[in-house]
Amino acid sequence: MAVRPPQQDDDEPDTLTFGIAALDAHLSEGDLTFPATTREVVLALGDPAVPYDASGSTVSLSEAFDDVDKGEFDNKTELLNALHPVFEEYRVTSSGGFLKQLRSMLPF
């Protein structure tokens, strides 16, 4: 998922990634081969703090894996699919309701 951040005058990126999109960026930069266990993924990526909402709240990858039933992944897609509901649950739980979500999406 990605949301446009508030307008800024500096050279910040145009979008803020979170959830599996943010994790995918870490996977692209890491030295990881599949199949891989959760431990191998965490070691290869350095247990990054992954943002799970548009306000920048984060969860460590190892903590997110605590809520995944599977311990080994055959490919990147399988890994991202397993973590998607975990990040979504974090986002919904910490959102504070509909109005806060709506405010986070508006550019002002």
Image: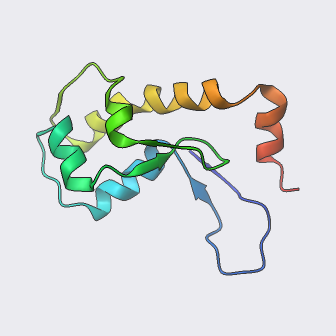
In the rendered view, how is the structure colored?
rainbow
Q: Quadrant of the N terminus?
A: top right
User: Does 89 sit above or below residue 31?
Assistant: above
Q: Nearer the viewer, residue 46 or 103?
A: 46
Q: Nearer the viewer, residue 35 or 99?
A: 99
Give the residue drawn at x 67%, y 48%: 55
Give the residue drawn at x 81%, y 37%: 102
The x and y percentages for residue 4 are: 70, 57
Q: Residue furthest right?
A: 108
Relative to 78, 91 lies left or right: right
Relative to 10, 64 lies left or right: left
Could you say which quadrant of the image residue 30 lies in?
A: bottom left
Could you say which quadrant of the image residue 13 lies in?
A: bottom right
Q: Residue furthest bottom?
A: 10
User: How many labels were placed on the picture?
Assistant: 0
User: Does 108 sit above or below residue 79?
Assistant: below
Residue 81 appears in the rendering? no
Residue 43 appears in the rendering? yes
Give the residue drawn at x 77%, y 72%: 8
Q: Quadrant of the C terminus?
A: bottom right
The x and y percentages for residue 78 are: 27, 34
The x and y percentages for residue 41 are: 21, 45
Could you say which quadrant of the image residue 70 lies in?
A: top left
Relative to 66, 105 lies left or right: right
The x and y percentages for residue 20 are: 44, 43
Q: Residue furthest top?
A: 69
